[in-house]
Image (cartoon, rainbow, N blue to C red):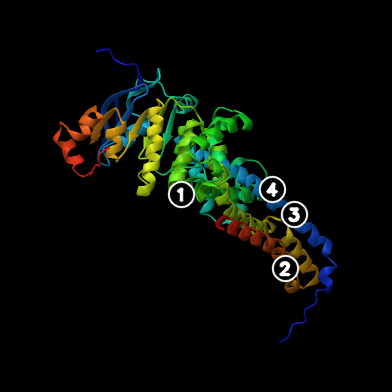
């Protein structure tokens, strides 16, 4: 059996793919930023030393780390509105789920980064008389950031790939638009091949960049 | 006998880690310009006591005074604010066994870090403080080097310069020579000796018995979180009264000064 590949009809729908690409990139950037800020807050809460903050924050991290992103997404869209008694637009539910899912992992990266800094560094900064904020800003964070860059980039790569899930709640991302094109042209193989190539072209430079950073760190 | 004014005054300090008493009701004082050496087996609590002096460990009870400003600890004492603790620490310079230079800063930036980030001085002002200190430590030609390029002895000299840049009233040395090659130990000890001669009040946790004997004014022998014996340096090292001190000192071979 031979299949005749024909990308011609697909390319006519280029503008649909472009819209999908914009949604995918937009959701990646937005959920990465919201996720990192939320992840940072979760980390600070977990390290605060106050149980009233650290226990709930730890619970949030574990809940989002230990359930699939797809389940969280569907739950935020269908179940959360019932729990809270409000209605959520698909885009809002998608952003919420992706951001919190990311936040759990970013929080772990931040925690591991801070924990990896030798105790002597904290001691030396404290002994000089640095107050806690100065110590973080001048001594701990600059060192932790170098160690966190590569894992953070990996997590953003995953974040971008996870945006493909939001098609399930009808957000018109690359995959959702692809499904539209596939049903219009009856050429799903060409459509998914095209989508795969687009994802690859975006992510490959990113992973190579991360590798370069990592090599510079060890070099 | 008239008491000299104390630069460091440790009164009834106790500390527990879990169920273990690490410090049991320790009191000792160091007059201005004097050197006190803390000796004892590992686990005796001498490093913990030193870390208590600049609050890297918080005592469970007692009080610590440096040059008239006092920190009290225990149930009745109020919780110390982070800012107040930082200000108290700035009065005491501390030098660690593992150097703990900031690896992302050059040698010069390390020495400037206290003046700049703690006292908020400008880059120029901080540099005017740091450069002469590096020169005094014989490290001025390494100003722009990163710490990873330095030998252990060089790192420790930079660490001492970094502490001195805060113009501390006392210096605390926590086994400052224990991680060094034997030939580097002497160069750090001579720096410490110079500081003592310049009148810097010091508490030195050390295994260098000849340094304790020749440079310290007072030697305190600790075991199991308590002070076993304290007295004039030469007497404690050469003619200890307590059996436990004698037993401990047997393990050291000491050259003549």
Q: Position of residue A182 (x, y in %)?
A: 76, 68
Q: Quadrant of the N terminus of chain A?
A: bottom right
Q: Position of residue B217 (x, y in %)?
A: 29, 27
Q: Could you say whether the residue bearing mark 1 is in a helix, strand or loop?
A: loop
Q: Position of residue A51 (x, y in %)?
A: 44, 36
Alpha carbon of mark 3 to alpha carbon of mark 2: how far?
A: 17 Å
The part of the image, by quadrant, that contains residue A184 is bottom right
| Residue at horizontal 77 percent and vertical 79 percent from the top | A5
Report the residue marked by disc 1.
B151
Whether discs 1 and 2 lie on one chain: the answer is no
Q: Which mark is residue A30?
A: 4
Can residue B49 be seen here? The reply is yes
Report the residue marked by disc 2.
A197
Whether discs 3 and 2 lie on one chain: the answer is yes
Alpha carbon of mark 1 to alpha carbon of mark 3: how far?
A: 54 Å
Q: Are marks 2 and 4 in contact (CB under 8 Å)?
A: no
Whether discs 4 and 3 lie on one chain: the answer is yes
| Residue at horizontal 55 percent and vertical 47 percent from the top | B146
Q: Which mark is residue B37?
A: none
In the rendered view, would you say B56 is above or below A206? above
Q: Could you say whether the residue bearing mark 3 is in a helix, strand or loop?
A: helix
> Looking at this view, is B203 or B190 the one in front?
B190
* Crowd band around label 2 with a 10 angstrom C-alpha radius: few (<14), some (14–19), many (20+): few
Q: Position of residue A35 (x, y in %)?
A: 62, 47
């Amino acid at each position: 059996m031979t299949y005749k590949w024909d990308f011609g009809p697909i390319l006519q729908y280029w503008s649909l793919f472009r819209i999908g690409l914009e949604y995918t990139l937009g959701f990646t950037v937005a959920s990465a930023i919201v996720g990192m800020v939320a992840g940072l807050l979760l980390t600070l809460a977990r390290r605060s030393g106050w149980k009233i903050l650290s226990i709930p924050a730890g619970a949030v991290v574990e809940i989002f780390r230990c359930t699939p992103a797809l389940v969280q997404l569907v739950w935020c869209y269908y179940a959360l509105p019932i729990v809270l008694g409000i209605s959520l637009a698909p885009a809002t539910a998608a952003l919420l789920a992706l951001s919190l899912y990311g936040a759990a992992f970013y929080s772990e990266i931040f925690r591991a980064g801070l924990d990896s800094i030798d105790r002597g560094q904290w001691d030396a900064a404290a002994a000089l008389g640095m107050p806690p904020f100065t110590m973080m800003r001048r001594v701990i964070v600059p060192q932790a950031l170098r160690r966190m860059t590569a894992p953070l980039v990996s997590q953003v790569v995953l974040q971008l790939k996870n945006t493909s899930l939001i098609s399930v709640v009808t957000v018109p991302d690359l995959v959702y638009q692809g499904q539209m094109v596939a049903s219009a042209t009856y050429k799903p193989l060409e459509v998914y091949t095209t989508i795969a190539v687009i994802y690859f072209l975006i992510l490959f430079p990113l992973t190579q960049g991360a590798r370069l950073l990592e090599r510079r760190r060890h070099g | 006998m008239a008491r000299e004014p104390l630069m460091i005054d440790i009164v009834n300090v106790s500390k527990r880690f879990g169920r273990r008493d690490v410090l049991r009701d320790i009191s000792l004082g160091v007059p201005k310009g004097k050197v006190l050496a803390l000796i004892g087996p590992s686990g005796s609590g001498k490093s913990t006591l030193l870390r208590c002096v600049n609050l890297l460990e918080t005592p469970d009870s007692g009080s610590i005074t440096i040059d008239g400003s006092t920190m009290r600890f225990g149930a009745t004492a109020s919780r110390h604010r982070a800012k107040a603790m930082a200000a108290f620490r700035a009065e005491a310079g501390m030098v660690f066994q593992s150097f703990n230079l900031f690896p992302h800063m050059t040698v010069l930036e390390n020495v400037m870090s206290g003046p700049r980030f703690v006292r908020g001085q400008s880059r120029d002002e901080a540099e005017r403080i740091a450069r002469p200190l590096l020169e005094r430590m014989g490290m001025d030609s390494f100003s722009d080097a990163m710490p990873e390029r330095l030998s252990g002895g060089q790192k420790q000299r930079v660490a001492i310069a970094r502490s001195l840049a805060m113009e501390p009233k006392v210096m605390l040395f926590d086994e400052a020579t224990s991680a060094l090659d034997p030939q580097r130990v002497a160069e750090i000890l001579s720096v410490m000796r110079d500081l003592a001669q310049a009148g810097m009040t010091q508490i030195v946790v050390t295994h260098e018995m000849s340094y304790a004997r020749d440079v310290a004014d007072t030697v305190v022998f600790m075991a199991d979180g308590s002070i076993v014996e304290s007295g004039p340096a030469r007497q404690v090292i050469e003619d200890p009264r307590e059996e436990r001190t004698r037993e401990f000192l047997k393990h050291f071979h000491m050259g003549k000064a």
